Image (spheres, rainbow, N blue to C red):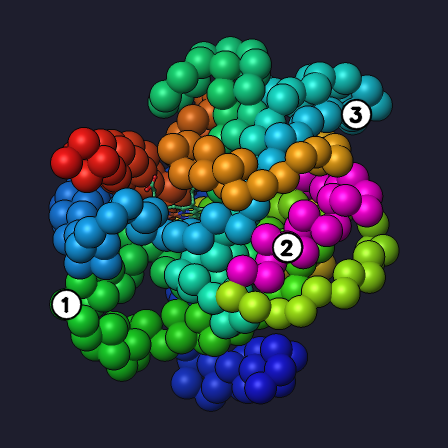
Amino acid sequence: MNIPYRSLLMTSLCALIACSPSYDNLEPGQERLSPDEAENTAAMIEAIKAITLQRNPSGLVERFNQVKTLGCFDASFDVPQELESSLQHGIFVPGASYPAQLRFANATQHDDREDDFHGLSIKLHSTPGTALWGQDGQVDFLLNSYPALFAADPGDFRDFIEATRDGKLWRYFVNPSHFYSLGIVVSGREKIDNPFTTRFWSTTPYRHGSDSTSAVKYSVRPCTAEKIRLEIEEHPDFLTDVMHKHLEQSPVCLDFMAQFQTDPKKMPIENAAVIWKESESPFVSLAKIHIAQQPTSETTNDNCESLSFNPWQTLEAHRPLGGINRTRKPIYAEIGRFREQQNQLRTSN
Ligand code: HEM
């Protein structure tokens, strides 16, 4: 079924069975800690380790999410000289240019012809300031190819992961309180024809500056709607070929944008499954990402395998907000370490 029909069907189903997640009742930019967050986080770490070992009984251990690297590129992240003063916070210094690494990935599939979520991980280098986690001088952004996450909060994400670990994913989706998830999964998993022309979203919010009432979501999309014609036969790794062919023909420009929270009820911080409507608050451009024409090969993708990204590898001015982001801090740190240790063990044996 093509995507507009699927979205329409899911929207109608959701209207019938009231499956959209509940909204928050917080002040602008405000977070609400849930009492079971630490327990949910610890349970997710254990379940993710178990799933990782189940899925990778031998050989190199793949990431738990965004498993297949489609392309790994050097880029520059350029803040315009004329950036409006209200947007100038943290790394967004007018005229700044940071060397960047970009990793495009399939969330779960090894065959690029299958429907899937897709991911874009961005690592900036030579950034100013002190990192909230990780190494000073680096800032990471992690984005997904759909504007909402399929899990509203850490509790639902934990239920999903534990059902996956137990091989009983149906258990998660038959629970009426998770019907909204099914809508997002059905609408969001799609086949793409070129990661460079795919749009990505952070789905979770971040601070913008020192004002505690500020919150933004990020999105990345091509600078122009112009499509390049590429004659590529589809095969399990065709998206890598598409990106290489695209770069042979032209450099790539992506727009890095932010959307400000203007209404805490319609644009909640603590519910990552709610799309912040662009009709409420349109995205504004913060920077351009330029990927110059460059040599590309299997090895450049291999180099990306040792990279790890964490949304907390950032500055206080861009502090991750909301329960999903809070739990990601220890989870990515622990799972990144676990993956590295497993891979060292496996390559030394
Ligand atoms: C509680 C919610 C989440 C959990 C538990 C989770 C868990 C993980 C884990 C364990 C990894 C692999 C890390 C590694 O092996 O180094 C990962 C990777 C990734 N996740 Fe998440 N994730 C969550 C939410 C999100 C959200 C909201 C996004 C973005 C919209 C996202 C985007 C990504 C991307 C792009 C990667 C690949 C990073 C890379 O290139 O190394 N995740 N996630």
* Residue at left offset 74%, top offset 33%: 292
Three-letter amino acid code at the position of disc 3: Pro
* Secondary structure under the numbered disc 3 in the rendered image: loop
Q: Nearer the viewer, residue 153 or 241?
A: 241
Q: Residues within 10 Å of mark 1 (few under 14, many from 20)?
A: few
Question: Taking 46 as reference, is 141 left or right?
Answer: right
* Secondary structure under the numbered disc 1 in the rendered image: loop
Could you give the CA–CA distance between mark 2 and mark 1, rounded to whole angstroms? 36 Å
Three-letter amino acid code at the position of disc 2: Asp
Camera-nearest label, 2 or 3: 2
The spot of residue 44 in percent (x, y) is 20, 50
Q: Residues within 10 Å of mark 2 (few under 14, many from 20)?
A: many
* Residue at left offset 81%, top offset 47%: 249
The spot of residue 97 in percent (x, y) is 70, 19
The spot of residue 343 in percent (x, y) is 24, 37
Residue 251: quarter of image: top right
Residue 124: quarter of image: top right
Of label 2 and label 1, which has the lower sequence position? 1
Of label 1 and label 3, which has the lower sequence position? 3
Q: Residue 116: within the magenta?
A: no
Q: Which range of residues does the magenta coloring cover?
A: 237-257
Three-letter amino acid code at the position of disc 1: Asp
Q: Which residue is mark 1?
A: 166
Are the residues flagged by discs 2 and 3 in contact, CB closer than 8 Å?
no
Q: Residues within 10 Å of mark 3 (few under 14, many from 20)?
A: some
Could you give the CA–CA distance between mark 1 and mark 3, rounded to whole angstroms? 49 Å
Up/down of 244 relative to 279, above or below: above
The spot of residue 27 in percent (x, y) is 47, 42
Residue 330 at least partly seen: no
Q: What number is the disc on residue 241?
A: 2
